[in-house]
Image (cartoon, grey):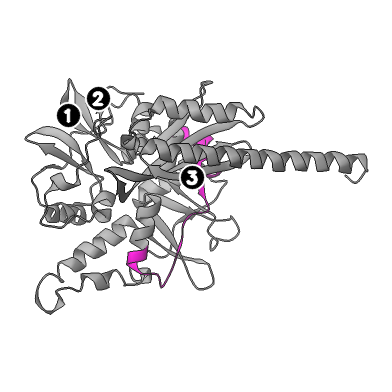
């Protein structure tokens, strides 16, 4: 299936010279998936609500201040006749909900995550939430400030945070849109008069005041189709995963991005590797990353890897112009999820540290498994099983 029939020509476009304050208002008024940025009519990139929220760019600054062209890869874009699987990969790797669609090198329209999910909805009944959800999510407490929520969203590159009450039970959820809506709305009243300078106080407002409650949840045995239908029907980007017998306990999160990532899984022998923020690659290539992960996996033939996810995140700190990068590698295997993280100046250094830690963690899992198998053999010999 290609995207020719599901892409749309309806999208919001701004020039690089537009004020950031105006762009923030666009997200508040229309809640678009993303805004296309052009420079004298030529495509420059896409701005998401998350980028606007997490940036430190002032309202009077121009949109150009937020655009970060990569030395190795252009801003994400797809051909109008591209297939759905490749388009899903582009959205996931660019950490975007919308991508521009081109026809004969001309900007034709956009494709959104919702459009793709709606098109493949009937095919999602073969997957369960357990197949694709993210376990052990980052959470907040009800009295945590909005500033802490923003830091957590930025640090982990996520879009939603479950909120727990004093008993550790799920009481709400806070998303980037909730925070952006609140901050933008309140900023309109803190720029003049007696409340000038009160912006900092907004960051101390407890998340309890802005969180959504009650929370829409799902369970591990629900199908991906059921989860996506719930998200589309309620205009949610994700759901909280709870045990079937207790919807107060948070065990994970499933998002539209998780489902899109699943669409990129292949049945080919070559392992599927997904890279988030691929534009941050400097002296290492996508092919190099895949080869390194395969080298680790190939050492342990009894470990079957269904999927590998590599995520890069840039810190503000720099060394001689090279940014400090955080890298996380997560493998989904027949022995559970295994991860390795690392930091370094430049994406290659960060990846090298992460891949070393990943291999040590793989060895640890292999050792634990071997110990369990050996213990089982002994018990059987002793007729204890």
Q: Residues within 10 Å of mark 2 (few under 14, many from 20)?
A: many
Tell me how far mark 1 sits from mark 2, CA to CA: 8 Å
Tell me: 21 left or right of 46: left
Q: Residue at x 51, y 22 (%)?
A: 270
* Tag 1 near tag 2, CB within 8 Å: yes
N-term-proximal mark, 3 vs 1: 1
Residue pointed to by mark 2: 80
* Tag 2 near tag 3, CB within 8 Å: no
N-term-proximal mark, 2 vs 3: 2
Local secondary structure at mark 2: loop
N-term-proximal mark, 1 vs 2: 2
Q: Residue at x 12, y 69 (%)?
A: 191
385 relative to 7, above or below: below
Q: In the rendering, at what x and y percent does residue 15 appear?
A: 10, 42
Tell me how far mark 3 sits from mark 1, CA to CA: 39 Å
Extent of the magenta region: 122-148
Instruction: Tell me the tag on residue 108.
Output: 1
Q: In the rendering, at what x and y percent does residue 106 appear?
A: 15, 25
| Pick the front one: 159 or 310 | 310
Local secondary structure at mark 1: strand
311 relative to 202, above or below: above
Instruction: Tell me the tag on residue 341.
Output: 3
Closer to the eye: label 2 or 3: 3
Q: Is residue 136 inside the magenta stretch?
A: yes
| Pick the front one: 109 or 119 | 109
Q: In the rendering, at what x and y percent does residue 7 appear?
A: 25, 31
Q: Residue at x 8, y 45 (%)?
A: 17
The quarter of the displayed image where residue 201 is located: bottom left
State which quarter of the image contains the N terminus: top left
């Amino acid at each position: 299936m290609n995207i020719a029939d599901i892409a749309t020509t309806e999208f919001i476009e701004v020039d690089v010279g537009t004020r950031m304050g105006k762009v923030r208002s666009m997200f508040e008024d229309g809640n678009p998936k993303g805004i296309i940025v052009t420079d004298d009519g030529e495509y420059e990139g896409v701005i998401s609500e998350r980028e606007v929220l997490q940036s430190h760019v002032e309202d009077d600054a121009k949109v150009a201040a937020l655009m970060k062209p990569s030395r190795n890869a252009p801003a994400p874009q797809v051909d109008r006749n591209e297939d759905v699987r490749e388009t899903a990969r582009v959205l996931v790797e660019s950490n975007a909900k919308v991508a521009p669609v081109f026809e004969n090198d001309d900007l034709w329209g956009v494709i959104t995550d919702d459009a793709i999910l709606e098109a493949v909805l009937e095919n999602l009944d073969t997957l369960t939430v357990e197949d694709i959800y993210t376990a052990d999510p980052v959470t907040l407490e009800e009295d945590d400030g909005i500033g802490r929520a923003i830091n957590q969203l930025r640090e982990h590159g996520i879009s939603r945070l479950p909120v727990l009450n004093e008993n550790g039970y799920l009481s709400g959820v806070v998303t980037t849109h909730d925070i952006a809506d609140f901050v933008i709305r309140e900023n309109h009243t803190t720029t003049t008069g007696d409340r000038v300078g009160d912006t900092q106080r907004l960051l101390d407002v407890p998340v309890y005041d802005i969180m959504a409650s009650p929370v829409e949840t799902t369970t591990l045995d629900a199908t991906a189709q059921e989860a996506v239908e719930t998200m589309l029907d309620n205009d949610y980007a994700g759901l909280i995963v709870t045990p079937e017998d207790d919807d107060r306990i948070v065990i994970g999160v499933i998002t539209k991005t998780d489902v899109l990532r699943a669409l990129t899984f292949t049945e080919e022998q070559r392992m599927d590797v997904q890279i988030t923020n691929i534009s941050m690659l400097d002296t290492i290539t996508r092919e190099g990353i895949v080869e390194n992960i395969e080298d680790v996996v190939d050492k342990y033939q009894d470990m079957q890897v269904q999927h590998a996810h590599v995520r890069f995140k840039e810190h503000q700190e720099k060394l001689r112009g090279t940014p400090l990068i955080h890298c996380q590698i997560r493998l989904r295997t027949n022995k559970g999820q295994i991860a390795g993280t690392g930091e370094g100046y430049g994406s290659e250094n960060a990846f090298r540290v992460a891949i070393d830690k990943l291999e040590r963690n793989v060895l640890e899992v292999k050792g634990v498994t071997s110990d369990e198998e050996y213990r089982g053999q002994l018990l059987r010999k002793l007729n204890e099983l």
